[in-house]
Amino acid sequence: MENMSFEGPEFLKEKYDLHNAEEVEAAAERTEARTGEAVPQDPASRIQNYLNRFTEITEREDPDTRERGMDALKKVLHDNFVITKEEISESVFLLEQRIAREQGYGNIEITDEFREKKAEQIINNQTRSLDAWIEYLSSPDAQYPDWAKYWAFRSMVGMGKLQKEVDDEGKETARFQKRTKDTVVSFPPLNPRALALTIGVLKEKLGEEAKPKQEQELIANQSIKLSDEEFQKLLSTENFSKIYAQFLIEMPEYSTEKLQEIRGTWVTYKKGSDAHELVKSMEGYPLEWCTADYDTAQNQLRGGDFHVYYSLNESGEAVVPRLAIRMQNDHIAEDPRGIAPNQNLDPYIVPVLEEKLKEFGPQGYAYKEKSADMKRLTEIENRVKQEKELTKDDLTFLYEIDKPIKGFGYQKDPRINELRQGRNAEEDMLVIFECTREQIAHAPSQINENTKAYVGQLEPGIFQKLPENLEHCYTSFPYNKIRRENVEIGGKSAEQLISEMEAAGINISGYAKSMLKNREFVPGKNPEEATLIRLTVADLGFKSSATTDQLYERAQILGLELCPADTGPNYHSKYRNQRLNRWIYMGMKPIAGSDGNPSVFQLGRYGDGDGLWLYGYWAQPDSSEWFPSNECVFRLRKSES
């Protein structure tokens, strides 16, 4: 638990009467039951005890338990705040009908299918936008006090559509509408810089109010549009929605012309130095970097150096922030940040980053792939603007057929979807797969000896019907590719497998090692080649979470079977280049770990230099949850013929 400043909990007490909330009382009871010690009765302590539960989840060191905790937390928040189908008003569908008519599409019938698709779109949009806040506020970048995160999140889930207005004097203002149960718009856009400023000014205000009245001073005006009087009036509301909206509209975009100027200089702010100079250098620029807040910048400088690249302005001064690299001691702490949406790099600055990364040795080279991807994406974007045809290689890259496009932001580069949305995926598949329209099957009945690709739902026995040499199989193109891989299994003892993995640099958790040493772990006596199918829980047909029994039953219906116990270690040894920070779960008969819980092997690869890992994942038959995005491996059942 962080050192507790009582101004924050006191603020929540006054603003929300939070200390009397049922959830705070329940948290105190859970703490007392777990520790045997009573939580102090003062409001600040009880509120902080409640907030500590969220910190306990987000700061778990074990990635397995953290992922489970975060998935469970997201599910609760989705249930509480994301709109349901029943809450979507009929007026939403009527509006769609009116717009279609006004655009010349005639009278569109509002069918059940239409309602279903529109509702699914609304729910998915809200879920994604809510997750953006959850993921950022639980990331190492969001170095804010617990109470400030609570204030921001509780306010944000009550904010609806952003409305911008211009008054008679040409002054732009903005406000968020109040979110209600039937609000269909996504949650507010997450802008780390606006968030940092919003929390920063309130922290300063509460800090001043904690002083004796005669020592209190006005907070410095952080707005570039409001007068001092207007800023103080805004801050006095202590209203997150209003303050955040103001900082959000003060983010003018960099012009394309100025971005093309990449001459400049790198400045290194040394570890342990004062953050004022760093923060001052960013004032007035539309950055999404949370380093714009002094406290955050100071905390980051305690951990390591901070490198910023400044390009030249119109006067030839190197003062325009374009790139940031944060260090943690001697290592790059996170992906370099740019000034494009989601902190991606702008299209012109990649060569500057490539040159800088050479100074960091091996870890710098790890980022070169991202730089190459961003350069390639820019080339494709320019070809599209020039109305030039894209080649097979271009399309294979754009649709991420062989590998995901890697950028430097928190989320995917928005240009990927923008470029895809302007294309006909059905036509592009013919180029990528080098086939005719008739050679792409969309249902099992269309499969024949000439089939080169299958794009459709998985039906019972589907894998026995597909040609053995079929290279392209998707439940939905291009996102849901089903992968077929061959691995040699059997003929090795647990001790041999452990030795091989350790020699290959694969880390084995203590829990996974206890599974390998369990007598239930029985490898095949003789070597054999196993054909494996890798797919997600969603590919198997589950739109929400599934239990282990449900998952295994569905896999069997589709023509798959459980993997032998030694498949996971052998698979990890062969396929070592799996996606960074993603997990693969083995569909196998569960084996008890050191705590007695039935578990399956979980394969992971970290991007922070910690490498490959073999873990265990709890897999109780009727209680463990498998989420739609979980990627699983099953064995292909041989055809009886």
Image: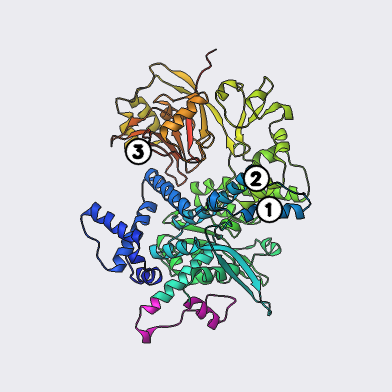
Dot placed on the residue nearer the N-terminal end, 3 or 1: 1
Is residue 293 among what the camera can see? no
Q: Amino acid at mark 2?
A: Phe
Q: Amino acid at mark 3?
A: Ser
Q: Is residue 390 within the magenta segment? A: no
Q: Amino acid at mark 1?
A: Glu
Query: Can you identify the residue that label 1 sits on?
Result: 96
Magenta residues (range): 207-236
Asked if marks 1 and 2 touch (Cβ < 8 Å), the reply is yes
Residue at the extreme bottom of the image, as rendered: 214
Residue 114's disc number: 2
Q: Is residue 217 within the magenta segment? A: yes
Residue 184 % position (x, y): 58, 56
Who's the residue at 52% across and 28% down the image?
533
Please tell me whether residue 97 is drawn above or below residue 551 in the rendered image: below
Residue 530 % position (x, y): 48, 21
* For residue 53, side relative to residue 317 (left or right): left
